[in-house]
């Protein structure tokens, strides 16, 4: 019996002393939340860094917004230049090809122009009612000796939403001035005679060769009619006889490209 008692005493003696008035507790398990070791620090943005980032973004947005109007203006001007170039070639060919002015059967292939040509002024007269392509072509072919010819036109080759008279309030408009004059050529060695008298300095080319100039100005304000700074001129020579359609009111003129004589 002595041996077990001695073992009991040795166990009690080996136990660590405890503070008076405090209960003994088991040691915390490994990796417990009550561990005294601090958590590792994590990287984060400071308020100063966030403010700097927002300032950089704001500066970039201001720069982009400032450049955007200039880019839109450049795109619009490029589109207008392309429209004028294509329309200029079209009207040059239309006037140069002319039509059969000796009868009422001028081709109706230009009747679509009634949706684009708003008015034509010849001298002191302005024509707003343009019923057919024949009337439009005949007025545009009026020689400069009959008065100044100016047309107000919506772009023929503009956006699809502006075709056939659509969106007339916002469509691109331009002014086209037409000048048709006899070609200023003088023959100093003419052998032509009248009643046996030699005709020196006869301007014989003026009977069948004409100088055609189209002067474009754009854009035209739809409300005020004020013309912008755009300017372009197209020029060509037209061979043939320029004939007036005698039965027309107003007077219509057409080139006869296959006729080379003064009738």
Image (cartoon, rainbow, N blue to C red):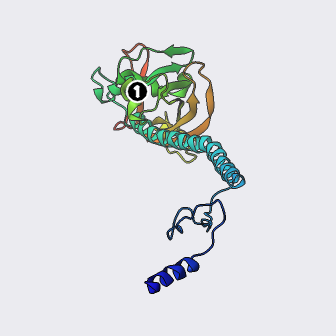
- The residue under the point 62% across, 63% down is 43
Mark 1 neighbour density, 10 Å: few (under 14) some (14–19) many (20 or more): many
* Quarter containing the C terminus: top left
Badge 1 is on which residue?
137
Q: Of helix, strand and loop, which one carries label 1?
A: helix
Q: Is residue 209 left or right of residue 48?
A: left
The answer to which quarter of the image holds residue 163 is top left
> Is 10 situated above or below 181?
below
Percent x, y of residue 67: 63, 46
The answer to which quarter of the image holds residue 103 is top left
* Quarter containing the N terminus: bottom left
Name the one closer to the observer, 18 or 70: 18
Q: Residue furthest right?
A: 48
Q: Is residue 244 left or right of residue 224?
A: left
Residue 84 visible in this rendered orientation of the protein: yes
> Is 132 situated above or below 25?
above
Percent x, y of residue 58: 66, 46
Percent x, y of residue 25: 55, 64
């Amino acid at each position: 019996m002595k041996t077990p008692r001695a073992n009991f005493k040795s166990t009690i003696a080996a136990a660590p002393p405890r503070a008076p008035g405090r209960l003994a507790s088991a040691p915390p398990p490994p990796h417990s939340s009550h561990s005294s070791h601090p958590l590792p620090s994590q990287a984060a943005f400071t308020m100063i860094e966030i403010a700097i980032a927002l300032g950089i973004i704001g500066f970039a947005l201001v720069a982009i917004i400032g450049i955007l109007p200039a880019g839109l203006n450049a795109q619009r001007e490029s589109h207008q230049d392309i429209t004028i170039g294509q329309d200029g070639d079209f009207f040059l060919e239309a006037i140069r090809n002319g039509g059969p002015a000796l009868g009422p059967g001028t081709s109706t292939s230009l009747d679509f122009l009634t949706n684009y040509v708003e008015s034509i002024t010849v001298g002191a007269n302005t024509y707003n009612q343009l019923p057919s392509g024949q009337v439009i072509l005949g007025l545009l072919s009026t020689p400069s000796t009959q008065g100044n010819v100016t047309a107000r036109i919506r772009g023929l080759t503009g956006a699809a939403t502006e075709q056939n008279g659509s969106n007339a309030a916002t469509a691109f408009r331009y002014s086209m001035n037409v000048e048709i004059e006899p070609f200023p050529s003088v023959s100093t060695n003419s052998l032509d005679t009248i009643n046996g008298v030699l005709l020196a300095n006869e301007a014989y080319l003026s009977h069948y060769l004409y100088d055609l100039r189209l002067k474009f100005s754009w854009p035209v304000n739809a409300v005020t009619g004020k013309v912008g700074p755009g300017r372009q001129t197209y020029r060509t020579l037209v061979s043939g006889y320029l004939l007036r359609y005698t039965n027309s009111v107003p007077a219509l003129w057409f080139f006869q490209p296959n006729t080379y004589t003064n009738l």
